[in-house]
Amino acid sequence: MKCKKCGGKAVINMPQHNMGLCKDDFLQWLPEQMQKHIKKQKMFTPEEKILVAVSGGKDSLALWDMLNILGYQADGLYIALGIDEGISYSSESQRLTEKFANARGLNLHVVNMTADYGIDLPTLAKETRRGRDKPCSSCGLVKRHEMNRIARDFGYDVLATGHNLDDEAATLFSNTLQWNGDYLIRQHPVLAERDGLARKVKPLFRFYEKEMAAYTLLRGIEYIYDECPFAEGSTSTQYKELLNQLEHEHPGTKIHFFTKFLSAKKKGLFAEPTTKIVPELHICPKCGQPTSAHEICTFCRMMDRVNQ
Amino acid sequence: MKCKKCGGKAVINMPQHNMGLCKDDFLQWLPEQMQKHIKKQKMFTPEEKILVAVSGGKDSLALWDMLNILGYQADGLYIALGIDEGISYSSESQRLTEKFANARGLNLHVVNMTADYGIDLPTLAKETRRGRDKPCSSCGLVKRHEMNRIARDFGYDVLATGHNLDDEAATLFSNTLQWNGDYLIRQHPVLAERDGLARKVKPLFRFYEKEMAAYTLLRGIEYIYDECPFAEGSTSTQYKELLNQLEHEHPGTKIHFFTKFLSAKKKGLFAEPTTKIVPELHICPKCGQPTSAHEICTFCRMMDRVNQ
């Protein structure tokens, strides 16, 4: 297969775009595309301060790398969750994240659950009803809380996460299977800032997981190859596999599924909700963060329970 | 497994309802459920005349059987398409349909494409652009035209088809993958009558294909087991297989996917369309049927083309 731009040897085939590209052209095309959609979706400007949530995986490291290449002011945030039973998942991902940041002279915030809160995530999850089966729900709660906290404390305008198209399509698939109206109406690569919560953006929302893997490989970025051990067998992994089956039969299924959803929504497919999707926020008296929970926020309530 | 009603030996397990039933209870439960949803969805009353589109397959024969048991005035319509290349698909399905009707003294209309229009469906499809790859699109057009014609000529109030839950879920899946707003807004087990077109209803919309197969088997109804030879490898077959994979992992996926869609729609998830989904209808000057096409209807135009 030939590179569509220069006619050289293609290293990646992207049937959904009916295009193959050589290494140099792919490494130029991907950040250019991202830049185009950052502007189109009004995600952020070069004047704004960005906090990138970095896990040590390919997507978030590649995102940070591209933001850096494009000249944005992007600092990283790594949350050390202490998932080190069996394999050293957290230690290894932290090592790779710090190595990436140091090699490029980038600024990295590190939150350490054990040091900052006296408990690691697997223990926390075990001790709460929320995480009896799987700690994923507690993990999401902790990560959201800490991302919002660091963004607020250090004055970041926007929080960027490395969700790629496969992630977004699987989430949309789940929301659609259940016709979860509130989630369908909210799902978008840009969530506006509100009441002290930073804007949230997903600049990789149009890129296939395969493209992100190719990017990190071709850029020589070391990343943690293993999935989080708790993700194994999750529903979202099943949905990704199903969507990959469809993609295999009909190239472009995933990107059309997601982008047609966005454009149908923009054209007014969904009715304006009659009640507020997210209720009024107030300030949690313990941590000072905006919350929709009754009085104390869910994060602080969970921490109180395990510290009793 | 035990029958949930009588404690006897269950012949069918329906994990989506967390229920197994014995033969007698299943044969009572299925028509009762159908009756319940015919009323709930206001499909038709015992005073109305129903035309059932019968293909000779399990779903449409079971539908006709149950309508008969429930005391509705339901006549059948069989459309002989002449799909007899290789296997005698049409001849055999016609034979089984007539056998079913005769054994029960039911009234059956038969439309024969070759006798009535001088051409069979496979030939028609080959000679039109519409059917170059697959005749399914021409077939749908012919069937809709003939169902509407017989319903109008013989004064039926309502047209019933044997689409089951697997069919409806696969259609919904397809409409959702493409976020086809017009189709999503229109998809419903009841389409109201309008401008000379009979009401269209799908009384089996809550029943799994597996349940319909069990019903015909337990009732001793002979039906054509083969799928239409042209359906093989179709997208809708692929979608059904995917949904079956999900159903296997999470029993109830199919019925929840479809019924949650209906209830989200009822609760106003979708905005009222700003333009008419189905444009104004006028009468085709050739066949006298309502059509949204420019002047002559699509069916007559297709027939004109092949008869030139």
Image (cartoon, coloured by chain):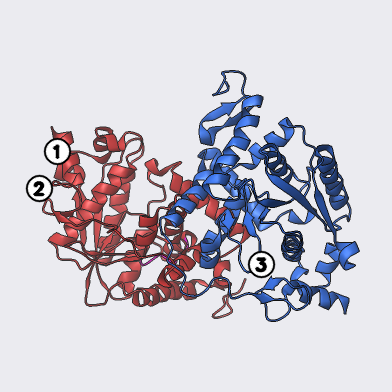
Chain colours: A blue, B red
Amino acid type assigned to the residue bearing label 1 in the image: Asp
- In the image, the segment drawn in magenta is B203-208
Residue position for label 2: B286
Q: Is mark 3 on a helix, strand or loop?
A: loop
CB-based contact (under 8 Å), mark 2 and mark 1: yes
Amino acid type assigned to the residue bearing label 3 in the image: Gly
Residue position for label 3: A196
Residue plotted at (41% across, 55% down): A267
Residue A5 location (% of width, % of height): 55, 23
Magenta span: predominant SS is loop
Q: Which of marks 2 and 1 is nearer the N terminus?
A: 2
Q: Is residue B204 magenta?
A: yes
- Residue density around tag 3, few if under 14, some if 14–19, many if 20 or more, within 10 Å: some
CB-based contact (under 8 Å), mark 3 and mark 2: no
In terms of depth relative to the viewer, which is nearer, A206 or A148?
A148
Residue A124 location (% of width, % of height): 83, 68
Q: How far apart are marks 3 and 1 (CA)?
A: 67 Å
Residue position for label 1: B304
